[in-house]
Image (cartoon, rainbow, N blue to C red):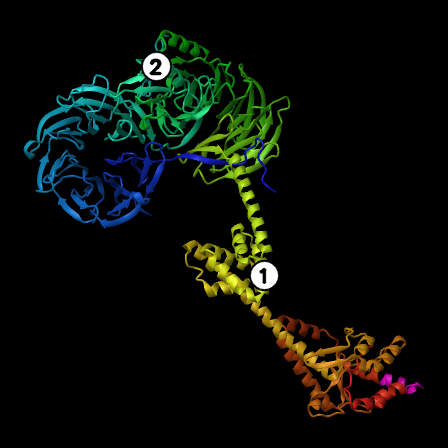
Amino acid sequence: PPPTMSAGLSRTFRVERTVRACYTGGKVCVARRAQSRLYSWCNGAVAVTDIYNGSIIMMIEAGENDGFTSFAVDPAGKVLITSAQSQLISTWDLTDGGKKIRSWRGHPLPVLSMEVDPSGTLVATGSADRTVRVWDISKGHITHRFTGHSGVVGLVYFRPVYTASKMELITCSDGGEIKVYELYSRRTQTLTEHMSTATGIAFSPDGSRMFSAGRDSVINVWTTERNDYKLVKTMPVYESLEGIVSLPASTVFPDASVDERYLATAGEHGKIVVWEQNNLRKVFTVNISAGSSAEVNQNDGEKDEKEGKAATQVLQLFLAEKMEGGGFIISTTHEHNIHFNSLLGLEQTRVVVGHNDEVLDIVWAPLQKVKKISQGSNGENGSVNETGNKTDAKSQDESNDANENGAVEGTHAESQAVFVATNSSAIRLYDAKTLNSRLLMGHSETVLSLAITPDGKYLLSGSKDTTVRVWELCQPTVRINEDNIHLKGQCRELQPPRCVAVFKGHTKAISSICACRRATSSFFISCSRDTTMKLWDFSPLRKRQKKAKRVSSGEDSKLAPKLFRKAQNGVVSHEKDVNCVAVSLDDRIIATGSSDRTVKLWSAPDLSYLATLKGHKRGVWTVAFSDVDKVVCSGSGDQTIKIWSVESDFQCLRTFQGHEASVTQVSFINAGTQLLSCSSDAVMKLWTVKSNECIWTLADVHDDKIWALKSSRDGRSVVTGGEDSKIVFWVDATTEEDEKERAIYEAKVLKEQELRNNLRAKNWVKAIRIALELTHSRQLYKIFTHLYQHAQTDEIVVEALAECSPEERAKIILWIREWNTHTERMPVAHYVLARMLRNHRILDGLDSTSRQDLRNAMRHIINYSNRHFKRLDTLLQKTYLFDHMLATTSLVGIAAGEIQGMGGLNLPGKDDIEEDGISFDADEEEDDVEPELEESEDAEIDPDKLLKRVDPRKLLQGADDAGVEVYDATGFEMAWEDDEGNEEVKDDDKDDVKANHRIETEESESRFSTPKDRKSKKKQRGREPSKSASGQIRRSKRKAKELESSKPNSSKKSDRKSGGSRQTRSSTKRRSPRIAKKN
């Protein structure tokens, strides 16, 4: 039947986007001319990331048990050069999916720095062996080798301005030594004015001056006149510097002069500092970790507290001036984050989080209207709401009312952005579409839990620093140019929330927080590892923020975060750590789960005790209320999920079993009809509450424990995060799957109808093709069976197999393997296989996996074929016994009626029986049979009527009056009768007959029976009574003769014995054997 469309229930989810690690420390760079990709170090490999959508394009790996030590990319972004721990330098083709071009042996020690010249033909490498070498990229051979450094070479830099007669290479080593190599003249100059390692080199736009920065906290200025470098100025900066760049003339920032050129430096203070190139005067400072300093207001006499003051240390600074959007200053930090500051204002527009470490909690960000900011040609920003407008008021209002997702002001729904708490003090704000992110700095220790207020205006965060912070969400912006077109590099800028309040009252880490569910309420719950639960009222905070906004006349409030120390209510909730908390939809009931294996219910807002739900065998890690029913769900370390009633009985209503590890998160979706759950073994499951059934399981996306799971309000979007540092965005694919299944079903119905039409028209070739497309092995077998029965259609099979692809022929062989296992299908299987092997090379055109599968299938076919041949050979051998029996019976001429009368075989009533060329006429023996049948009705069977046959020895001699051998099947006793019927037993003849019979019997048994059968017969013979049966037969015969002699009428029998009328017929016809049962 066709698939049915799901009515409001989800059946499957698909991965929409995955955020994974792209930078784990080390070098980051972009190509000089193609700056849409970011090349970064990631776990010993090189990750190639699209800057605009955040997706990893490819991952270049060194190989098993090896890793890269340094890398560089050519100016066009087509070739990547790497150096591995195995001292091999390799080139990779980035236009062909990262295919390796060539490798060659490099330095004897690891390469620590690498740089490509502006022309893209040479690459310079600096090594731990204190040497510098220059290589030809296309041919892989060395062109220059420089020595003389006293330490490890940590930086190589090609001078950007060069001529056909001059190309300079600057290198820096430990100890502050700088060397300048001229490649054409091989002239070398050494600069030793730095007291520590030089970390950055920059040149003025005209190339007349060189600037060097190092960890000795100074900037040195050098003149380059007459090919001689001289120190002209040293400027102390009072921080260890990690990079220096020369800003282009298009750089714009407040108080910038058009006639002046500027430098930018960054170091251990986590700030980008702008300097004038002429006199090295500091003119501007940008804090990379903006908002990291969170000072608490002292208006109420509170003690000064400065939290989160630890600066973000910059590890690298470089320029990407050709990126779309006006160019950027790119910096990396020790937290594995890559920051982009636009050259048009030096504002931080995006952050690429290189590594999330361990994801602990996730919440969906509320949907906000987007604010468009026009960007003038000179870089001046114009807000559509605040400053001089570049467009009219009507267009401004329209641009403010709509956003990229089609939402209008006042709408509160989940957007494509999430807040993420990781194993860090900073909270990440991710845009799911572009993977643009911003950092929320404020906590001093790891953030463990997040929550969003029902009005969508505040974010709550709980940390190990025992505080709960409240963040006011800001409006995202989109930069446009003068033509109202989005700037690609700056599309949808996420504005980081601002911390407005700090709640402090717990003595240990905040393990879980939960906000109220109704917009009319103003409280949130915090649980701690100190076994307490507190209810906080933040209605005073809302009043304070409204007042601050009225005073500031619409501008952002500059008030510092306010500290709240007093909770509205508090209670010791459990005996052990409180792991989770949830609030019911009506804000009346609070549920908490603890490591003491219980779930407790409390009333809000007074926190009075209601009930304890017992049933779990291990600690409870998650609780969730249904949006429809009065039930609460709990997940535990005992691998079960339970649904409890929150009404008067507080009983367990359902128990879901199926997880094989601790259940870490559960969530109700689709109006409480279904459950989503995840566990510590990286498995996600979808349950139907009514049927208590798991309908979907996925275990191959995350690589480690899943700690966070949040679903959107409509249940169609889900986001998960775990210990593997991945953030996975899921979307409900039920509708898509239903439509896809229906389309597949309709196409299958049409194909099946086409198959029937071709079968009816006897178009066998096309029918075979359609059966292969539909994977109908049974229908294909029927077609081949029909062709097998008509030998003249062999060319049809050959033609059909010729039109098949190698994969389809391999599929047929796999089906032949199944057909060959059945005796009745074996002939057809060999019929098709023979024509395939005679006309095709079945292994050609297949990959290694398919070839191996095909080899295994052929071995299977050979094994079963050997069994079939052995069975047929055995049957053929057994037919020889029937031939011998039929031939012997033909010579003697068994009378069918006589056999039937004596209880023997009931032969078919045919007039003529023909076997082996010998004809039998049943009517010829009718006269002898009828009297025998009549006599047998009243008289007993005579024991003398035994199986008689013609002696073959006398038949060969042509003796017409051959005696008849009397054969006793029970006692194996034989005798000879003469023509007059007198029994004549001779010992010698009897022994010969016995021996011959025994030899024939043993030969027959050894030929047609198995050793097991012979062994069983031998045992059976051993169990027979020792008393000779032949003696009993002789005594019964003598007794029968005495009875016959005493009868008055025995003429009929005596005639038979003496050969009366029968003797007359025997001259022209054969004698028939007499068969009788033994008494």
Q: Is residue 550 left or right of residue 238?
A: right
**Front one among 428 and 478:** 478
SS type, badge 1: helix
Whole-percent x, y for residue 524 in the image: 48, 18
Q: Residue most toward the front?
A: 761
Q: Crowding near pointer 2: few (<14 within 10 Å), some, many (20+)? A: few
Quadrant where the N terminus sits is: top right
* On screen, residue 56 above or below 381: below
Q: Which residue is mark 1?
A: 785
Q: Residue most toward the right?
A: 1048
Q: For residue 392, which numbered disc appears in the image?
A: 2
How many numbered marks are there? 2
* On screen, residue 553 above or below 466: above
Q: For residue 112, which numbered disc appears in the image?
A: none
Whole-percent x, y for residue 903 in the image: 81, 74
Q: Is residue 1031 left or right of residue 69?
A: right
Q: Is residue 819 left or right of residue 837?
A: right
* On screen, residue 488 above or below 818: above
Whole-percent x, y for residue 293 in the image: 31, 19
**Front one among 699 and 1022:** 699
Q: Mark 1 or mark 2: name the one nearer the start of the chain.
A: 2
Amino acid type indicated by mark 2? Asp
CA distance for labels 1 and 2 = 81 Å
Residue under the point 35% across and 8% down: 552
Amino acid type indicated by mark 1? Thr
The magenta segment:
1038-1050
SS type, badge 2: loop
